[in-house]
Every structure is written in structure tokens, then in C-alpha cells.
Amino acid sequence: MKRSKLINLTMPVFFALFGLWILFTSRNMGKLEGTFPRMVGVLTFIVALFQLYFDVRLEDHKDKFRGCNLRKVIEALVAMSLYVFMLNKIGYLLDTALIAFYIMHSLGYRKYGLAVPIAVAFSLGAFFVFKILLGVPLPTILLDF
């Protein structure tokens, strides 16, 4: 099997395993709390299997990762890990505003006078949708209602 084909098969295999991991870990949740994670796990697994099937059947593979900036990928993974780690410590609003600002900065947006209000507005908008409209419990420090 060609190296490029093996490289292209890594992502569907990873996401299939990730979907199974979500299903496995959601077993410990209650029936109501675990519904959404189970749906995400099943959909992730099914989509990954379809992608794996089509990638296996494909004859001509191009290296999808050629030119990938590995440093930026690792930087993004560290930022997302910090986001998850800090969520319960500093609350959803501040944590989400910080990750939104980081994303804008990492994508090259340098107008900080505008980036900060946009990050705060995004955080407040997401908070409104999830906490107020959908009733999703979010870790909050100051606005615990």
C-alpha cells in the first residue's frame, strides 16, 4: 500500500476510534445526560466508516497533509486542551472569550481594538444560546443562575 494512501486512511480510523470512545465514555452518564454524546458518537463513527470506505476504494491518493504547519497544529491542540482544562476554573464566558481571541490572533487578525469586543460578543452570544435558550449547564463563576 502506498504511503499517501496510508496517510489518508489515518483520519477516518482516528475518528472511528474517537466515535467509539465517545460511546464508551457516555455509558456512565444518565439516560438524559448521555443522549447527545451518544448521538455525536454514533454519527462520528458512521461518517468515519463512510470516509474510510471511500478512501480505501480510491485509487489515486494525494497527500492531504503536505504543507501542513505542524507547529500550528500542536499550538492549536495545546490551546484547545487549555480551554477544556480552564473551563471549570475561570468559567465559560472568560474561557470562551480567550479562545475566540486566540483563534482570531492565530488566523492573522491583528486589530486588537476590534478583536477583543468581537471575542467578548461571541462568548456572550454562545452563552445566551447554550445557557439561556437551550438550558445547557455551563460552568460559570460570576453569572451562576
Image: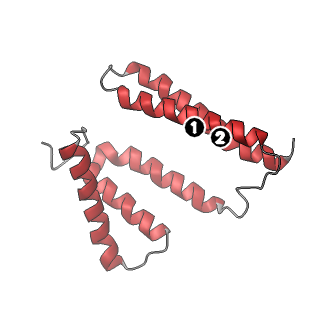
- In the picture, residue 105 is in which quadrant? bottom left
Q: Residue at label 1?
A: 47
Residue 101, image x, y percentages: 37, 65
Q: Residue at x 26, y 45 (%)?
A: 130
Residue 17 appears anywhere in the view: yes
| Crowd rating for badge 1 (residues with CA inside 10 Å; few <14, some 14–19, many 20+) | some
Task: Say which of 7 and 54 sits in front.
Answer: 54
| Crowd rating for badge 2 (residues with CA inside 10 Å; few <14, some 14–19, many 20+) | some
Q: In this view, does 145 lie above or below 114?
A: above
Residue 131, image x, y percentages: 21, 44
Residue 93 is marked as: none
Left or right of 86, for residue 93: left
Task: Say which of 22 and 84 sits in front.
Answer: 22
Label 2 sits on a secondary structure element that is helix
Left or right of 90, for residue 11: right
Q: Residue at label 2?
A: 51
